[in-house]
Amino acid sequence: MNRLIGKSLTRRGVLGAGLAISGVLAMPSILRAQDKSLKVGVYGGYFKKSFDEHVFPDFTKATGIAVESVAEPTGEAWLVQLEQAAKAGQAPADLSMMSQTSTLKGQSTELWTPLDTSKFKHYGDLLPRFINKYPDGRVAGIGAVAWWITLVSNTDVYKDAPTSWAALWDKANEDKLGLLALASNSFLLEVTAKTFMGGTNALDTEEGLNKAFEKLAEVKPNVRLWYRDEAQFEQALKSGEIPMGQYYHDVTGLAVADGFHVRSTFPKEGGIQDSGNWVLSRASTKVDEAHVFIDYMSQPSMQGVMSRKVGTTPTLKKEVLDLKPEEFAAVSSDIDPIIPRYDLYTSKADWINQKWTELIVG
Amino acid sequence: MRREAPKSVADYTPLFFPALMLIVFFVVPFSTMIAVSFFKRNPSGFYTPDFVFDNYARFLSVFFGGVLGFSLMLAVLVAVCCVAIAFPFTYLLTRRPRRVQTLWLVGLLSVLSLSEVIIGFAWSTLFSRTAGITNLFVAIGLMDKPVALLPTFGAVLTGMVYQALPYTILVLYPALVRFDPTLLEAARTLGASPIRAFFNVVAPALRNTIVATLIMVFVFALGSYLLPQILGRPQHWTLSVLITDQAIYQSNMPFGAAMAVFLVLISLALVGLTLLVGRRENAL
């Protein structure tokens, strides 16, 4: 007997078996989820890292569906790739995070599989602005992540926080501002309309748009930097080189936590709320799994996790959330937000782009 | 050895590989771009294959003409500055001992390892009010208080000259190192001052090299799109910046392609003109 054990249980054999067993124990999700899987596209970098860490493992544990996360670029490059792939019957990702404008553009070619909202337990709790519908009412996308662009300032240069977007127009701020360089990511037309023209509905007509452009032209002498690259402005804001501007609320919060002398203010006209949707490529065959995933992500508890761990704004009504008041304040505000007029960036895209470019370059 | 004219197809075989590379890496992509530039843009979606002139029509405006003019002017200025700095520098370098030359060249090559992003951010820090070189001037009493040197045209030009200078030196170096020093000695013996000898003997003898270098730096600078954004104001943005906006942010490939085709054609025309003028002068 002893001999037998001695023979079969070599030192190397024990180690090997141990490694194999611990490997199996460490990856139960993969074993269980062999037959069910989902490819999910998330914005590369911070979002993908956070999702891989805080969201996907728990989802697999809860539902048995394995997730393969795909890093997708922001902007419209991913939309173009999904469209080309769908024409060939391929889906580089089943579900993707997609900006509002890109979701609308995808609608034009029926790129998104309409979603069955009866499968989402908390569909009724979603804020209406996080439901993206086809013109005929079918649902094309459900809010995935939302974030704010707010008025940010350097606390060394501005002892008192600005209270209104009108600060951008203040003559005292000449050559002190950093603003986003494109109409479709700065949403400054909407800011102008909400601050001076009574609301973003003023942009419905070409006349209203022209007025907004005229008003916006007055900001130009105050702008030191029109940025496309976030790092460019963040650095200058922290050092006080460019002490005021528009920037992302979540990233500014991280900078404050790191001890930099900056602050993010929700102006009285509201912060700009931008967001991304979950959309399902028409080439995907994982329709059921995709619905399970969206349902899972739209739970109040999951939205709470996202707000605490990733810093995104909840897509559900405040009442159903389990966030403490200070946790809610860190990622959102009760002030009525400025919702971008995404429709303008598809219906009048080139006209607005041309006017905008001439405004800031000319 | 006498060089014979190629007689059969086999004699042309050495040309096949470069021809293939030229087709794969230039003809095919460029043709695709030309084709796309005639496609029809759908603002609410993508684009559809078509043959329309809308994209070119949109480009033919005072606004884009101004941007194109600025881009060309900037590229020419960068080329002239680079050659003006690099030519005397490289000439003096070739007069140094071999070891010194090697050290300098290694140093220059290491500058090439810096990406445009790093160069841009480094200069933006150097030119800033809070951490820039003007703080140094204040410390030694040259200035009262630190100022920001960017965003300005000067900052854009400095950044781009810095980026292109190593290339300029490396292109000039082989020609200058082969330059026969006895020509200069002859000039000196005949009574020319060193400066006069440099401009009357060295510069004319290397005219073709200088023209070729100017063209290379011009083309190199024409494609720059990051430095104008980091170091300049919107009026210093080059056409390349606007092409990127169209292609990446507006997903308007047809218009971006039309602009790029225009830029390539204009720069080819300018290069051709330069060569033509150069040949005329040579003939005199």
Image (cartoon, rainbow, N blue to C red):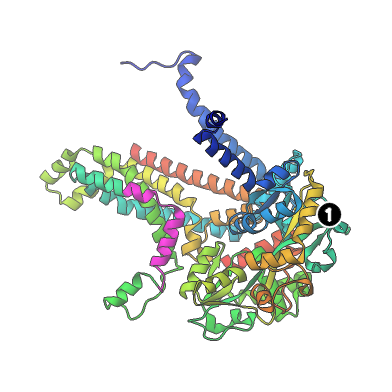
Left or right: residue B71 compared with residue B3? right
Q: Which residue in the protein does label 1 denote?
A: A115
Q: Which quadrant does the N terminus of chain A fall into? A: top right
A142 or A272: which is nearer to us? A142
The number of callouts visible is 1
Task: Indicate the quadrant where residue A87 lies.
Answer: top right
Q: Residue at x 84, y 61 (%)?
A: A121
Q: Which residues are magenta?
A: B108-130
Task: Indicate the quadrant where residue B170 lies.
Answer: top left
Q: Secondary structure at mark 1?
A: loop
> Percent position (x, y) of residue B101?
23, 45
Instruction: Report the predominant secondary structure element of the magenta stretch.
Output: helix
Left or right: residue A206 compared with residue A5? right
Q: Amino acid at mark 1?
A: Leu
Q: Which quadrant does the C terminus of chain A fall into? A: bottom right
Q: Is disc 1 surrounded by few (<14), some (14 to 19) or many (20+) residues within 10 Å?
A: many
Measured along the vertical axis of the image, is residue B55 above or below residue A100? Answer: above
- Residue B125 among those drawn in magenta: yes
> Percent position (x, y) of residue B273?
45, 44
> Percent position (x, y) of residue B47?
72, 47
A205 or A142: which is nearer to us? A142
- Residue A41 among those drawn in magenta: no
Asked if residue B235 can be seen in this view, the reply is no
Asked if residue B203 can be seen in this view, the reply is yes
B7 or A137: which is nearer to us? A137
Measured along the vertical axis of the image, is residue B234 above or below residue B44? Answer: below
> Percent position (x, y) of residue B65?
57, 57
Parent chain of label 1: A
